Image (cartoon, coloured by chain):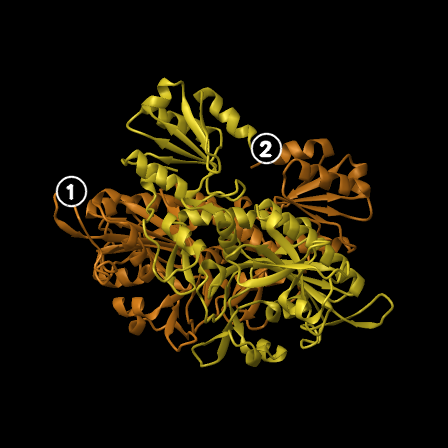
Chain colours: A orange, B yellow
Amino acid sequence: MKQSQLFTKTQKDAPKDEPSINAQLLIRAGYIDKLMAGVYTILPLGLRVMKKIENIIREEMNIIGGQEIFMPTLQPKENWMKTGRWKTMDDLYKVKDGSDREMALGPTHEEIVVPLAQKYINSYRDFPFYAYQFQNKFRMELRSKSGILRGREFIMKDLYSFHLTEEDLDAYYEKATKAYENIFHRTGIGEKTYRTFASGGSFSKYSHEYQAVTPAGEDLIHICNKCELAVNEEIKNETEVCPNCKGNDFRKEKAIEVGNIFKLNNKFTVPFGFKIKNERGEEREVLMGCYGIGLGRLMGTIVEIFHDEKGIIWPESVAPFKIHLISLGKNKEAEEIYNLLRKNNIEVLFDDREATAGQKFADADLLGIPYRAVVSEKSLQAGGVEIKKRNEKESEIIKIEKLVERLKKEV
Amino acid sequence: MKQSQLFTKTQKDAPKDEPSINAQLLIRAGYIDKLMAGVYTILPLGLRVMKKIENIIREEMNIIGGQEIFMPTLQPKENWMKTGRWKTMDDLYKVKDGSDREMALGPTHEEIVVPLAQKYINSYRDFPFYAYQFQNKFRMELRSKSGILRGREFIMKDLYSFHLTEEDLDAYYEKATKAYENIFHRTGIGEKTYRTFASGGSFSKYSHEYQAVTPAGEDLIHICNKCELAVNEEIKNETEVCPNCKGNDFRKEKAIEVGNIFKLNNKFTVPFGFKIKNERGEEREVLMGCYGIGLGRLMGTIVEIFHDEKGIIWPESVAPFKIHLISLGKNKEAEEIYNLLRKNNIEVLFDDREATAGQKFADADLLGIPYRAVVSEKSLQAGGVEIKKRNEKESEIIKIEKLVERLKKEV
């Protein structure tokens, strides 16, 4: 893509009402725009990042048998009355239809997916099965000060699994754990992210939060110094010792919850009377697990973890482009390199704007694309293109004909 | 995908409160599920169709320079007050945030995209530019009886173009026309779809609706028998003769509006004071065009046009799978063919269920996948696989080793 054609631009100053680093950098760089507190437009560069995150998650969900669907935002009050959450969920947006019937704006989809599954499933042979979606969710958040970490409107991947036995739920829960680990590793935050023991409510012993350690975190987690197991604040208050190794030496870290997995058991199937006869003819309540990841929150967390004073430093797997090609002064070589890279399916943002070298370099650092390639009279005289990684200081000159090979090698 | 693993199933009967053919067939086949009037869940098979439609539209939008973004559903009342539509738009859903501030659920995004563009654009050099999105829209529809043709919640592609001169808007409008023709041809309904003259409101002489002729249509269009130009009911009432050839012999057809393109001119930029100095230093109001397609409506229209008494007949470009592989009785060859097709990247739904031949054939006809390949003892004895197109009567036996080649040829 040519940067001169991009309708968004970088901005020098961050909005005053955005204290969070993620929102400051993402807004200044032109990845997102703030419409109002907790509500953001995803701009062209930001949508490229979101789609990469989405595709990584989709691949991992498909591997564990997830079937992708798309459930509605508008949800009937009746369903929410059945589970009791119409009254107990404080952050539920309510809206009236033409006939003054009330509906909820979906903050989550248990109330929809359970009766949906119930329509199609009538035999123990149909179990287990797994449905997931990427969907805009709505929560009436009062404290929307963490940029895209906590929105009133946000895109989530939510997976729901259905089982007839506890063993089957347990086994799938472990599979989902593996998928979640893959997702966080592939998006670059794996080393910082802890599967953290959390309360399971009254229905299962534990649930798990995936907590990414960063000073921007709103949560506190406690990590066992002996075995590296992490527990959240609530669990720590309940127990003195590590649930795994019985050690009692913990370190405290601030962290962002980037995902959670939860055994719902029969919590949402009971209200809808979703029961099935097993192979021995005995009626069984259907058991469920749910598995969530907020995509905007994940994008914001990546920015919190990977940035410096100059801007964002995207992991290659989620970067909007692989390479930022910068032309200094008019030269036809830059345009030729741009076409060469595109022909080789290398994702490239081409800074073909009329701007100073200083402006272009500052923008490149702010945008945070993994490779920067500068084409100037100087670089051409030295034999080619000056290439530098965003997270490294040193640059080097490489020949134009070697550029594609080099970029294809370094994945 | 193996059909035995699909959590949805076909249904014999259509819901009684769904008179439309599109909803009846899509629900019976398990493409969509009705949550309430005008609100549908898109099921795994339906989402595959929607994604194909989405990708065709995305490709055509990118060709004409569209930059994809994602704007919010929650929209501030102030923006809608500025354009006056907070009071004039009857079907606007309104919702309150925690502090009782009112917001709109976006039925369209002019109120968001104009101030968004205004933030980034400050020179005539930035023009023209084009932003589009795929987004869930909300309209308080009272007559939701046309299945997914008219929803209260529905996915739309909306493109907005920004220009400094009328000539530039006119030229882009023609480009968009070409893109729209490509979209309707590629999704299979090109021959039935007319670019139909419609009222331009008070701001431009004409707009255009893309009307697909089918008995299920809610609209009436008038087609000139001499030059094939189409006008909508409103225009026909205003004029006796064809605006193109001045002929006066029209035929009337029922049609579904699958898209529309509209020169908004300065209608939405004036309320936001979006003006730019041109290259001669003269202040100019920014001009806009908008270009919409409803994805669910397009899917429903395709079904209305391509079906028979047994079920849907998908055009190959939007079919959920290319081939429906049916195994009759246990045979290892079917499984081998399934793996062979997948290895060759041919999208295949494999009916590996324990069911009668009659049930499997009925389901295949209902689902409407372009090719049906039956593997049975009989077909194997005759030399291979019995292959039949959904829209043809005759089947033929082809050798297993010829199947991939044949399917790759027939695109």
Crowd tier of the residue under label 2, counting other residues whose Cα lies within 10 Å: few below 14, some 14–19, many 20 or above: few
Q: For marks 2 and 1, give the CA distance.
A: 53 Å
- For the residue labelled by badge 1, is the local secondary structure a helix, a strand or a loop? loop
Rendered view: A332 above or below A203: above
Rendered view: B333 above or below A45: above
Q: Badge 1 sits on which subunit?
A: A
Crowd tier of the residue under label 1, counting other residues whose Cα lies within 10 Å: few below 14, some 14–19, many 20 or above: few
Instruction: Answer with left or right where residue A237 lies relative to residue A37.
Output: left
- Residue A315 spot, x, y in % from top left: 54, 47
- Residue B377 spot, x, y in % from top left: 32, 22
Residue depicted at 60% across the width and 71% down the height = B111
**Viewer-proximal residue, B57 or B261?**
B261
The reply to whether callout 2 and callout 1 are in contact (CB within 8 Å) is: no
- Residue A76, numbered label: none
Location of mark 2 (residue) = A409
Rendered view: A163 above or below B151: above
- Residue A223 spot, x, y in % from top left: 33, 54
- Residue B277 spot, x, y in % from top left: 80, 70
Location of mark 1 (residue) = A279
Dot 2 or dot 1: first in sequence order is: 1
